[in-house]
Image (spheres, grey):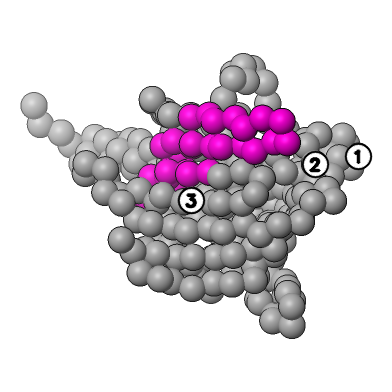
Amino acid sequence: MKFSNSHLLVLSVIAVAILSGTALAETPLVDPQIPNGEHAVYDTRVSDSKFTMDSTVIVKKDGSRELYEITTLSTRQDKVIRLDKKTLALVSVHALRKYTDATLDSMLNVVSEKQTFKDGEIKLADFNILMHIMRGYPFGKLPSLKIGYYGEGNEKSYTMTLIYKGIEKVTIKGKTYECHKLDFGMSGFIGTFLPKLNLWYSAAPPHCLVKYEGPEGPPGTPRRTLELVQYEVKGGK
């Protein structure tokens, strides 16, 4: 079968449209190139409790893909989060929560996930990965991002929104950092009555988390503050 030039032009346009649609369906997050062996220490406050949180990132191979394995340790909880290095998609979360009268061990494995980015929205399987995966936010290129959670019906519109607020300087213990700031909270009128979550990441790659202010988890959980007090790259295992 022979095609005329007009037919070929139409086919080319269709192909571009299909490819463009595919690109738009991909996650907007990018690999922040976290160095293997990154180590950070944070002064942390949850309600009236003060402690330090130790965070280490190791790059690991899992078959044909690379993973970030993020280990955070504190007197309140220990956690190991595994993310796909390329897309920052969640692979698993292993958490050990420490309470006065109990210690709880939980494991979340993502068995399957069809990643989509439709109409400026992404979905998360666990709220606590937010501060880690947003190191891959396209700072300065994407003004806002809507966040949903698995378990919501398809008919439910997302009401959580992340907004890029630009560059802001943050001073911690006499040291000043130039940071990208992100605000996260409920959209619409109800959002004016609920506390927002604020995230500051170093403006220079690999966009280390410098400061966190907001709920410890979803709305209704205790308020938490994290401030970076030590950063180094030890070298991976």
Which residue has dot 2 on it?
Answer: 222
User: Can you say whether 223 is above or below 112 in the image?
Assistant: below
Residue 163 horizontal side relative to residue 1, left or right: right
- Residue 218 location, x and y as percent? 72, 35
Q: Say whether disc 1 or disc 3 marks the residue closer to the N-terminus.
A: 3
- Looking at this view, name the residue that lies furthest to the left: 1
Indicate which disc residue 71 carries.
Answer: 3
- The vertical placement of 75 against 178, above or below, is above
Image quadrant assignment for residue 212: bottom right
Return the residue nearer the eye: 39 or 59: 39
Label 2: which secondary element:
loop
Q: Amino acid at mark 1?
A: Phe
**Is 84 or 41 nearer to us in this picture?**
41
Q: Does the magenta portion include 102?
A: yes
Q: Is residue 194 left or right of residue 76?
A: right
Can you say whether 3 is above or below 200 in the image? Answer: above
Mark 3, other Cα within 10 Å: few <14 / some 14–19 / many ≥20: some
State the SS at label 3.
strand
Label 1: how many residues lie within 10 Å, few (<14), some (14-19) or many (20+)? few
Q: Is residue 45 above or below residue 7?
A: below
Give the farthest residue toward the bottom: 174
Secondary structure at badge 1 equals: helix
Please report the bounds of the magenta region as a residue range. 79-107
Please name the residue that numbered disc 1 is placed on: 193
